[in-house]
Image (spheres, rainbow, N blue to C red):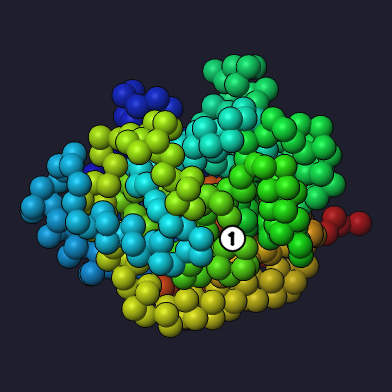
Amino acid sequence: MASNREAFDEARRYIAGGVNSPVRAFKAVGETPLFFASGYGCKITDIEGREYVDYVGSWGPHILGHAPEPVVTAITRAAKSSTSFGAPTVSETTLARMICEALPGCDRVRLTNSGTEASMSALRLARGATGRPKIVKFAGCYHGHVDSLLVSAGSGALTFGSPDSAGVTASVAADTIVLPFNDVDHVERAYAEWGDQIAATIVEPIAGNMGVVMPVRGYLESVAAITRESGALFIMDEVMTGFRVAWGSAQRLLNIQPDLTVLGKVIGGGMPLAAFGGRADLMDQLAPDGPVYQAGTLSGNPVAVSAGLATLTQLRSHPQIYRRLEVLSARLEFGLRKAAERAGLKVYIARCGSMLTVFFQAGPVHNLDDARRSNTGQFSRFHALMREQGHYLPPSQFEAWFVSNAHTFRDIDATISAAEHAFAQLVPEPVAN
């Protein structure tokens, strides 16, 4: 059996960078990436046969854990009928109806294959509906690798110290206004100067791609009001938070209704599926009914839709899942904080529901500049120590951990114990006189 190092060396011969998404390369933590062979519940096993408690969860989709029986059964049944038609299926309508019923103000949706595709399409719709060119986004919020949004992007782009990707032209970047997160004054000034040119404001209601960063009280409400006063659209990117932090997503949790919503991850149950949706008068401007073109050969793929339907059905039918996730995640947060205190290590832990980030700094963290003050060297060492003890964390300081319903109290306590051991090794030993 090949080792992870051997598998990575082989992958680099045929795959650009050896990975199909940059953060998987583990460059931010200076390690060799793991190649996984299987996963069940909250445990995953690499090709060397090592088992890990998983807090990545495929970067968020596995809210029920790996290979939950209802999802696997749904996928198997759908695949036996055909993996793709390139034509409508009734299951697409069922999933769309479920999403619309859960999200306030979402009358229609359009299914896509990825969050990037959904974000790109939502912005095109906003520009088409308003006849304006510019977009407001926030530093540290990541909305996929769309050219106009790879400007001060978070996630992998931040990790590699290159927020502005090569290949993004100056003319495209010029249509994106980048503002600091959690700062209403900057939003007011931007709209005072360019308001009649701005088509939309797009924001992660709870940021997850610079690590978990919560909105300060009144921030999102103010941004939405300023945006709409100028005739622009308020877009919530809930690719990460959608159906993760609550049934009905962050917008229901925070009681804020956007004009358009972008979804992904959980709604696909681990399969490639995303969506964007909103008010009927906006969504009806999409082709074939309207002038804004958007299409996709595999959009609404029946196998992916079946996984999404099975996942959302479980979450809707068993609301206690969200209550259990809150208890598990609160236990993890409290335990990690106390373990760091006992080690004399300063960390700032941000959490919303089953998403959390341990920032290696005193905090608080309200925006990208705050997040960047984290000690990434300490995080890298912590990541390695946790990995050695059988706990798989996101390989970047600037990402969210995800707790799944498959985690148990025993798993959580084992992680806290491992973290206490790791934290203790991060504290510099006193210098002898």
Mark 1 nearby-residue class (10 Å; few <14, some 14–19, many ≥20) = many
Rendered position, 121 above or below 109: above
Q: At x 32% / y 29%, what residue is drawn?
A: 10
**Residue 341 image point, x, y percent:** 75, 71
- On-image quarter of the C terminus: bottom right
Q: Is residue 170 above or below residue 82?
A: above
Q: 402 or 148: nearer the eye?
A: 148
Q: Secondary structure at mark 1?
A: loop
Q: Position of residue 336 (x, y in %)?
A: 64, 70
Extreme residue toward the left, this view: 80
- According to the picture, the residue beneath numbered tag 1 turns out to be 257
Residue 67 visible, this orientation: no
Q: Residue at x 8, y 52 (%)?
A: 81
For the question of whether residue 293 can be seen, the reply is yes
Q: Please identify the quadrant where the N terminus is shown.
A: top left
In percent of width and height, residue 410 lies at 45, 80
Q: Quadrant of residue 421?
A: bottom right
Residue 405 at x, y percent in the picture: 41, 73
Q: Nearer the viewer, residue 164 or 161?
A: 164
Residue sitting at the far right: 433
